[in-house]
Image (cartoon, helix red, strand yellow):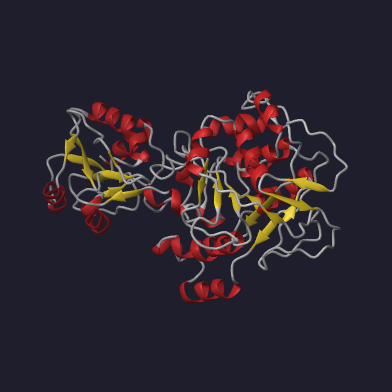
């Protein structure tokens, strides 16, 4: 895999620290590039090493997993390493309130030619703009799974032209893809989950690419995914992948927009007139492979457009496994284990006087009844699920509107030990799942839409009474 380094007419000066302080206001809505004096020297001074610049066709001393591309503008020769031990937890604390521009600049300063931006072809194009604003050379890589949207490939081309770079693409192993497709078909992930396909097409290629780096930069944000990314630091030792030196702790992971809200990222993109994926204008927010990505409706969380047939808690492909909080599945699984091992309890939801809390016995009895005095509408939920939390207001309003109408409104907690039962008997696919139990039928009817406003829910119930 070839890493392309961007061209930049302005190289870094040693006075950057004071420039950063002057540009601290360069966050969302007010941006200015860091000033870089033009230098004629052929050496780029990074905090950890000094790399001399050789001609374009110079033979590199880099790891064998990296092959210089034809567009590489800076090829490092032998570097004299200065061993510098950094406590990244302390650095993360220092940078917690720093702007994305400052964090990006610090990352590029520390790692120079041994760091690259991971670009998925979505809103993380903001990372490339930040890197460009620092005035430093930078590299960008992307995982081409072979199943991306045409609009994503078009954005890749636009980004390369705007920033005068060559994105370094890495691809899955052809034999592994062939074996998977021949044995399980093209769309096996709809049946048995996306993890196997993502492992072949994304995780393993990423692991190979990172072996040629000492650090990488991602577009992870705390508000991106329900229950899984809320504790992302701005910089950390990567807990999962290894870098070129091998072993635990050999790779550093930078997350410059970890503390930024999604709408602020878009304010930045519009302000800077950055090219974006045209799918965003069609309702797509989080964009991945074509078969596993779809548009979201107003009010839905952005990750609901990814792997929509699975649990909200499963909406991760494995690239950022080390940042994913895991559910404690003891009992109902009513707590979440944080990265430091502490547990955060989740309060129950859908609590109201006119919402019946069904036990396992209660829902089983409801299933067995062929003739019911009243129709029932039941939500299958998990209190930790952000999508369930987002639907709570609409569901409670639905319960108010149906009060005295002859339709009972209820809830059944279907995570933890009840999940297998709910999947087998109650058509649970992902949380929340809404079921309507007619008066004269044993089989419940599953709500087929992603619309969760009270009008849509009420229309569903009224159509089946």
Foreground of the two, 460 or 145: 145
- Marks counted in the figure total 0
Q: Is residue 312 left or right of residue 177?
A: left
As displayed, is residue 247 above or below residue 50?
A: below
Q: Is residue 277 visible?
A: no
As displayed, is residue 261 above or below residue 110?
A: above
Q: Quadrant of residue 389?
A: top left
Foreground of the two, 58 or 207: 58
Q: Residue at x 36, y 51 (%)?
A: 311
Q: Quadrant of residue 55?
A: bottom right
Q: Residue at x 44, y 52 (%)?
A: 322
Which x, y percent locates residue 96?
51, 33
- The N terminus: image quadrant: bottom right
Q: Is residue 49 left or right of residue 406?
A: right
Which x, y percent locates residue 67?
73, 65
Which x, y percent locates residue 61?
73, 64
Foreground of the two, 186 or 302: 302
Q: Residue at x 55, y 50 (%)?
A: 252
- The C terminus: image quadrant: top left
Q: Residue at x 48, y 52 (%)?
A: 320
Q: Is residue 277 left or right of residue 137?
A: left
Q: Is residue 457 visible?
A: yes
Q: Is residue 177 left or right of residue 45?
A: left
Which x, y percent locates residue 404?
17, 27
């Amino acid at each position: 895999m070839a890493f392309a380094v961007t061209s930049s007419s302005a190289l870094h000066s040693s006075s950057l620290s004071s420039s950063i302080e002057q540009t601290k206001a360069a966050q969302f809505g007010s941006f200015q590039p860091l000033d870089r004096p033009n230098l004629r020297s052929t050496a780029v001074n990074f905090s950890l090493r000094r790399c001399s610049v050789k001609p374009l066709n110079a033979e590199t001393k880099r790891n064998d997993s990296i092959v210089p591309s034809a567009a590489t503008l800076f090829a490092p020769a032998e570097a004299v390493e200065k061993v510098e031990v950094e406590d990244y937890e302390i650095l993360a604390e220092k940078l917690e309130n720093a702007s994305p521009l400052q964090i990006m600049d610090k990352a590029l300063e520390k790692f120079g030619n041994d760091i690259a931006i991971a670009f998925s072809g979505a809103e993380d194009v903001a990372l490339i703009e930040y890197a460009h604003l620092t005035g430093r050379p930078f590299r960008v890589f992307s995982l081409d799974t072979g199943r991306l949207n045409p609009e994503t490939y078009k954005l890749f081309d636009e980004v390369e032209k705007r920033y005068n770079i060559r994105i370094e693409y890495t691809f899955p192993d052809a034999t592994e893809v062939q074996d998977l497709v021949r044995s399980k078909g093209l769309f096996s992930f709809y049946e048995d989950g996306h993890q196997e396909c993502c492992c072949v097409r994304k995780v393993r290629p990423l692991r190979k690419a990172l072996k040629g780096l000492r650090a990488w930069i991602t577009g992870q944000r705390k508000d991106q995914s329900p229950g899984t990314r809320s504790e992302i630091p701005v910089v950390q030792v990567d807990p999962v992948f290894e870098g070129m030196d091998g072993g635990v702790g050999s790779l550093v992971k930078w997350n410059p927009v970890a503390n930024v809200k999604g709408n602020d990222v878009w304010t930045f993109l519009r302000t800077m007139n950055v090219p974006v994926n045209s799918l965003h204008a069609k309702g797509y927010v989080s964009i991945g492979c074509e078969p596993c990505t779809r548009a979201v409706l107003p009010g839905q969380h952005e990750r609901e457009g990814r792997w929509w047939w699975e649990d909200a808690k499963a909406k991760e492909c494995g690239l950022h496994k080390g940042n994913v909080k895991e559910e404690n599945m003891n009992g109902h699984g009513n707590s979440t284990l944080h990265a430091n091992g502490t547990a955060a309890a989740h309060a129950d939801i859908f609590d109201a006087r006119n919402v019946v809390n069904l036990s396992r016995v209660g829902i089983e009895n409801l299933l067995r009844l062929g003739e019911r005095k009243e129709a029932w509408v039941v939500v299958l939920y998990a209190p930790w699920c952000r999508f369930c939390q987002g639907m709570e207001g609409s569901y409670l309003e639905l319960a108010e509107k149906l009060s005295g109408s002859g339709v009972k409104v209820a809830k059944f907690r279907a995570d933890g030990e009840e999940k297998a039962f709910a999947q087998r008997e109650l058509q649970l696919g992902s949380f929340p799942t809404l079921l309507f139990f007619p008066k004269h039928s044993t089989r419940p009817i599953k709500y087929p839409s992603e619309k969760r406003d009270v009008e849509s829910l009420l229309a569903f119930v009224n159509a089946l009474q």
